[in-house]
Amino acid sequence: MLFIGKYNLLTIERVTSVGMFLSEVEGEEVLLPNQYLTDEMQVGDTIRVFVYLDSEDRPVATTETPKIIRNEFAFLEVKDISEYGAFMDWGLIKDLFVPFREQSVPMKLGEWHVVFLYLDNKSSRLIASTKIDRFLENERLTVQEGDEVDLLVWQKTDLGYNAIVNQYHKGLIYHNEVFRDLKPGDSLKGYVKKIRPENKLDISLQKAGGEHIEPSAQQILSELKRAGGFLNLSDTSSPEDIYRVFQISKKVFKKAIGGLYKQGIVRIADEGIYLIK
């Protein structure tokens, strides 16, 4: 069978005036239109294509790379609004539909949203949704404490930032552990800091152990954020100036900013230190 909304490995069966027909092992066919054909493609070859539905809801293949595939999340832009819902740019000719019922807040033209792509059982159509919680699974965890994970920031809350973990779980990054600008749609690496009751995941952007941020470095980062990302202090500043701001010695200060520099969190210049954004 063809996997709609996913990549398929298909065999080129025949060439027609409108393109090549590809088949899966059970013989079901799908058209790869002329605009995607290359001189290297020959009957009998097996090729990897993405299969979705065209404007008439017929399966069609493409060699283009979509920005999202079925049962995954991505950050996409709203391209159009109609009386039925919104349409998002997912990198293909036909835009991705988000019905009003799947919008957690009404979408507007030009906005960017984190969405989930799924195959609707009633209509057999590919549909995107911004009701992210519904598609996250924490009952059966596939991660453990200390694991490095892929994160997609989805939502800012009073506690911090909700993030999608490995395209599957829900995690939380606390405000007091964030020392760079974060916003919905950011993709980055993180670490499972703690698994709380009900399998709630606390996520850290810093690796635990030898690479953790010490209290003095935490203090410097907090002041950097408060000051807008720049402090007029560096390893050449006087001990008095450093103590006046942080109540720590110059030795402790240099060790702290050196550790932050090695982790890629700050940039040290003659005029001061900058928070890397």
Image (cartoon, grey):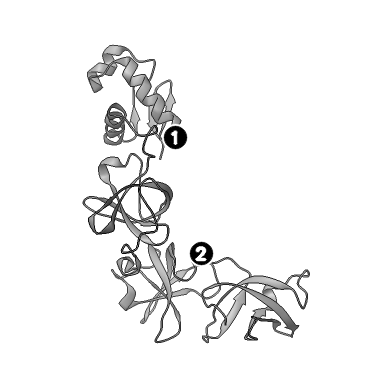
User: Mark 1 near mark 2, Cβ–Cβ under 8 Å?
Assistant: no
Q: From where the camera sits, is residue 194 visible? A: yes
Label 1 environment density (alpha carbons within 10 Å; few <14, some 14–19, many ≥20) = few
Label 2 environment density (alpha carbons within 10 Å; few <14, some 14–19, many ≥20) = few
Is 2 placed above or below 164 here? below
Q: In which quarter of the image is the N terminus?
A: bottom right
- The numbered mark, 1 or 2, whose residue comes first in the sequence reads 2
Is 100 placed above or below 245 here? below
The residue to which callout 1 is attached is 264
Q: What residue type is labelled 2?
A: Lys
Residue in front for this viewpoint, 179 or 259: 259
Is 141 placed above or below 92 here? above
The residue to which callout 2 is attached is 67
Is 82 placed above or below 65 here? below
Task: Give the CA separation, mark 1 to mark 2.
Answer: 28 Å
> Percent position (x, y) of residue 60?
59, 80
Q: Quadrant of residue 117?
A: bottom left
Q: Which amino acid does label 1 sit on?
A: Gly
Name which residue lies at 26% across and 19% down.
248
Checking the image for residue 177, the label placed there is none
Compared across the picture, whether 5 is left or right of 133 comes to right
Count the marks: 2
Residue in front for this viewpoint, 268 or 209: 209
> Percent position (x, y) of residue 177?
29, 41
> Percent position (x, y) of residue 226?
26, 35
Name which residue lies at 37% across and 25% down.
257
